[in-house]
Image (tube, grey):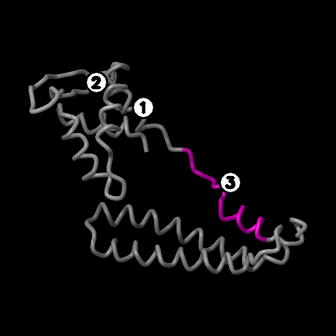
Amino acid sequence: MSIGHTLLGLLESGPRHGYDLKRAFDEKFGHDKPLHYGQVYSTMSRLLKNGLVEVDGVEPGGGPERKRYAITDAGITDVDAWLARPEAPEPYLQSVLYTKVVLALLTGRGAAELLDGQRSEHLRMMRILTDRKRRGDFADQLICDHALFHLEADLRWLELTAARLDRLAREVGA
């Protein structure tokens, strides 16, 4: 995820302090991985340096002065371009799961057991996400669906690989 573009998009509704940006980000996008304050302020510093935001005001606080940031026209143009650009599909050609299976075969370890263990872990995570989806709001349901579809694809691959394990062992020279 592009933190900078996300913060810029949040600024389109009006100027905000870094604290407010973090809170809005965490509420909308950071359920599982909230932003650190340092990440917000370093990103805002970079956006300021690149002319995508400007300081809209400075207020004294109990500690350092609180800057209020506003998006610039260049920032709006940058968000427009980012939203219009399709994300590159991730083909997962450097899969850790595949690497582990091949290494298990090459070293005489149990590749079938590895696949069984991974299948169990995927199913455990799918149960957690399904429960979260059931209890969550609409946005949480959508993000859980996304994760569940990826886990389902992994499960299909695990099953296919288990069915072809003998052939893979011959191919990799185990």
Q: CA distance from mark 3 to mark 2?
A: 37 Å
State left or right for residue 101 relative to residue 42: right
Circle 1: element type: helix
The residue stretch that appears in magenta: 88-104
Q: Which mark is residue 53?
A: 2
Q: Which mark is residue 149?
A: none
Residue appearing at x 68%, y 75% in the figure: 114
Q: Is residue 166 left or right of residue 97?
A: right
Q: In this view of the protein, which residue sits in the foreground, 118 or 7?
A: 118
Give how far across and how far down residue 74 sits, in percent: 34, 21
Tell me the distance, in whole angstroms, between the alpha carbons under discs 1 and 3: 29 Å
Comparing marks 1 and 3, which lies closer to the viewer? 3
- Where 36 falls versus 133 (above or below)? above
What crowding class fits label 2: few (fewer than 14 Cα within 10 Å), some (14-19), or many (20 or more)? many
Taking the magenta stretch, the answer to whether it contains residue 169 is no
Sequence-first tag of 2 and 1? 2
Q: Secondary structure at mark 3?
A: loop
- Residue that numbered label 3 is attached to: 94
The amino acid type of the residue labelled 3 equals Gln
Viewport quadrant of the N terminus: top left
Res 56 → quadrant? top left
Q: Quadrant of residue 155?
A: bottom right
Location of mark 1 (residue): 81
Residue type indicated by callout 1: Ala
Is 49 situated left or right of 117 in this image? left
